[in-house]
């Protein structure tokens, strides 16, 4: 299983110093369901640090 080496989503609850501390993550296509680049993917495990609606980082 892969390990998340670096994540720049500092707004995520699981992010500490650019390291992911979630047990596992789920990545899905973002938006139009057509993935042709990394911009078309999104971490679905993302959880905001503050109470507000989640979403892609
Ligand atoms: S859960 Fe996703 S967005 Fe949050 S730190 Fe881990 S890889 Fe980044």
Image (cartoon, rainbow, N blue to C red):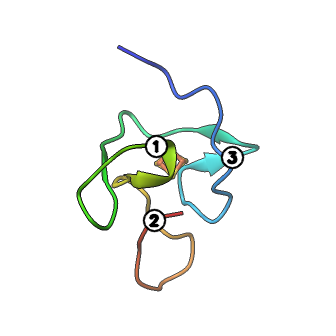
Looking at the image, which residue is at 41% across and 71% down?
55
Q: Is residue 26 above or below residue 9?
A: above
- Reading the image, the residue beneath label 1 is 37
Q: How far separated are the C-alphas under marks 2 and 1?
A: 15 Å
Tally the marks.
3
Q: Secondary structure at mark 1?
A: loop
Callouts 2 and 1 close, C-beta under 8 Å: no
Callouts 1 and 3 close, C-beta under 8 Å: no
Q: Secondary structure at mark 3?
A: strand
Q: Secondary structure at mark 2?
A: loop
Side of 20 relative to 33 (left or right): right
Q: Is residue 11 above or below residue 39?
A: below
Looking at the image, which residue is at 35% across and 13% down?
1
Circle 2 residues within 10 Å: few <14, some 14–19, many ≥20: some
Callouts 2 and 3 close, C-beta under 8 Å: no
Q: Quadrant of residue 25?
A: top left
- Reading the image, the residue beneath label 3 is 16
Q: Is mark 3 within 8 Å of ligand 1?
A: no
Q: How far separated are the C-alphas under marks 1 and 3?
A: 26 Å
Q: Earlier in the sequence, mark 2 or mark 3?
A: 3
- Reading the image, the residue beneath label 2 is 56
Q: Earlier in the sequence, mark 1 or mark 3?
A: 3
């Amino acid at each position: 299983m892969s390990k998340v080496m670096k994540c720049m989503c500092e707004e995520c609850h699981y992010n500490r110093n650019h390291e992911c501390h979630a047990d596992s993550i789920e990545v899905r296509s973002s938006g139009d369901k057509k993935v042709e680049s990394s911009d078309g993917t999104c971490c679905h495990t993302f959880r905001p640090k503050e109470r507000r609606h989640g979403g892609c980082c």
